Image (cartoon, grey):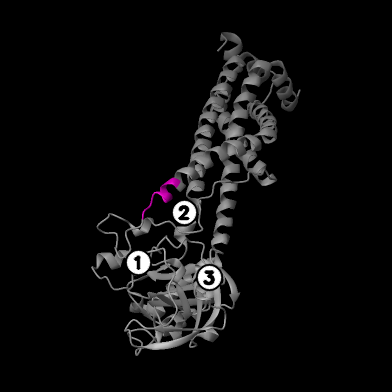
């Protein structure tokens, strides 16, 4: 009788041991398959998060250097330098901006309800932008352009503005109307044409975190036109931040290296943020449950291999007489080892098949519950962050600007678990490896068997 047929008969004859081995393998298969499914689902969710954030790099003020260096003056970089960075081959589109205090002149008044004259009577923030459509708040959909057109690079040196709808309604302004602005020196004056009206959903009573003004009074203008009102407007155009949209997320590292080479010391006081913070904020809960699932998978696999090795070793001791008879009849020891391995593989195949029927559903429920807890904890931590009062660096209040939450980057709280053939192949490979490992240890005992000793002395 060949060893394949003997393996089948042995499994059927020893139903109790077979069921114990099957149950052990079933637990191992479910845990390993759950680990694989969670790993795949979280990896897919991370890829989706990266795509939603986009291939973007922001040139922003480095708050750590600003606070650590004791300087209270925001750094500026020459617009021509930013233009050279925007011309790098990795860049698809880019924009930059600067800001200064401007004063609304004449019959027009600012919207009330927020801080009282944080920048003096009639004073507000005028932000000069190369391309307003590329501003993060517009791209994310937080701000909505209601009427008119966005300002683009073609409008760079024009005198055009975008204003918030509440400011427009209060002063009866429409697209095409003119508004007079006075620069921070309170002498330079110019007329600007309204190119568009946008909506900012923040209430008037909620001061802007960066500038401390009523958000309804924020003005966006062509960067060249507004810079002419600046107190240092006689010099070259200087900007405070920039956004670069890249061709592909894979070139972020190459762009940062090239940007540092091209700009050199001009980047002092700035940092190139490759959206790592937004991605980390979104995927933090995913990494937590993936690490937990991976650890549980390996622990269960190791423990399962040890249990199976013990079961097989006990089986060898219980079947010594059987093996002695077979060896005395001329059966090869290699066939006995192959029979043991085949019995384990057959049980493993059944266990993996059974696990594939209900493991995805169990994994989805368990992973979703665990991820929901992690996401809720992450959101509470983000919500607990408090910005320092307007005009403060946060140093005295113990505020770490690195912990400031990224807007429109909520921690991911849902994943979709799906079983595919590659997952079954992975679990099958791991199961086969565990089975062969469990067989390898008792195989040594089989090789040492002596049929004469077994049949004469029983050992």
Residue 128, label in figure: none
Mark before the other along the chain sequence, 3 or 2: 3
Neighbourhood count class around disc 3 (C-alpha, 10 Å): few under 14, some 14–19, many 20 upward? many
Please give the residue where the numbered disc 1 appears in the rendered image. Answer: 116
Mark before the other along the chain sequence, 1 or 2: 1
Distance from disc 1 to disc 3, alpha carbons, whole Å, reads: 20 Å
Residue positioned 59% across, 56% down in the render? 48
Distance from disc 1 to disc 2, alpha carbons, whole Å, reads: 35 Å
Tag 2 secondary structure: helix
Please give the residue where the numbered disc 3 appears in the rendered image. Answer: 165
Q: Residue furthest top?
A: 457
Tag 3 secondary structure: helix
Residue 1 appears left or right of 185: right
Query: Vertically, is 310 above or below 255?
Result: above
Please give the residue where the numbered disc 2 appears in the rendered image. Answer: 281
Query: Vertically, is 42 above or below 8?
Result: below
| Observer-nearest of 192 and 312 | 192
Q: Nearer the viewer, mark 1 or mark 2?
A: 1
Q: Are marks 1 and 2 in contact (CB under 8 Å)?
A: no
Residue 282 appears left or right of 26: left
């Amino acid at each position: 009788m060949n060893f394949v047929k003997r393996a089948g008969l042995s499994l059927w004859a020893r139903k109790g041991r077979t069921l114990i081995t099957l149950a052990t393998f079933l637990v191992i298969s479910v845990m390993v398959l759950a680990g694989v499914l969670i790993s795949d689902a979280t990896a897919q969710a991370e890829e989706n998060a990266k795509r939603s954030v986009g291939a973007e790099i922001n040139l922003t003020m480095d708050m750590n250097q600003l606070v650590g260096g004791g300087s209270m003056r925001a750094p500026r970089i020459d617009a021509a330098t930013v233009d050279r960075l925007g011309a790098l081959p990795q860049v698809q589109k880019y924009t930059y901006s600067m800001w200064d205090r401007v004063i609304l002149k004449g019959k027009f008044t600012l919207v009330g309800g927020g801080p009282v004259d944080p920048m003096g009577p009639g004073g507000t923030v005028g932000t000069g932008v190369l391309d307003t459509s590329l501003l993060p708040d517009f791209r994310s959909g937080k701000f909505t352009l209601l009427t008119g057109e966005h300002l683009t690079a073609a409008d760079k040196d024009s005198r055009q503005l975008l204003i918030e709808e509440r400011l427009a309604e209060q002063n009866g302004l429409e697209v095409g109307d003119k508004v007079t602005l006075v620069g921070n020196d309170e002498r330079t004056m110019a007329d600007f044409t309204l190119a568009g009206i946008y909506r900012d959903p923040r209430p008037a009573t909620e001061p802007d975190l960066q500038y401390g003004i009523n958000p309804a009074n924020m003005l966006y203008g062509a960067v060249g036109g507004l810079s002419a009102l600046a107190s240092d407007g006689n010099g070259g155009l200087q900007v405070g931040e920039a956004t670069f949209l890249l061709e592909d997320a894979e070139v972020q590292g190459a762009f940062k290296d090239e940007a540092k080479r091209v700009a050199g010391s001009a980047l002092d006081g700035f940092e190139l943020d490759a959206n790592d913070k937004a991605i980390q904020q979104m995927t933090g809960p995913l990494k937590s449950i993936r690490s937990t699932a991976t650890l549980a998978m390996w622990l269960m696999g190791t423990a399962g291999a040890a249990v199976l090795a013990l079961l097989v070793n006990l089986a060898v001791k219980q079947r010594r007489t059987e093996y002695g008879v077979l060896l005395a009849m001329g059966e090869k020891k290699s066939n006995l080892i192959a029979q043991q391995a085949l019995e384990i593989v057959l049980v493993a195949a059944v266990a993996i098949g059974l696990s594939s029927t209900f493991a995805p559903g169990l994994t989805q429920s368990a992973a979703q519950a665990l991820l929901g807890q992690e996401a809720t904890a992450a959101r509470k931590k983000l919500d607990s962050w408090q910005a320092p009062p307007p005009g403060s660096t946060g140093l005295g209040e113990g505020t770490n600007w690195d912990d400031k939450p990224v807007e429109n980057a909520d921690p991911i709280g849902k994943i979709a678990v799906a079983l595919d053939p590659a997952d079954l192949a992975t679990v099958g490979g791991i199961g086969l490896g565990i089975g062969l490992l469990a067989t390898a240890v008792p195989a040594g005992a089989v090789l040492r068997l002596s049929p004469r000793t077994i049949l004469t002395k029983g050992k």
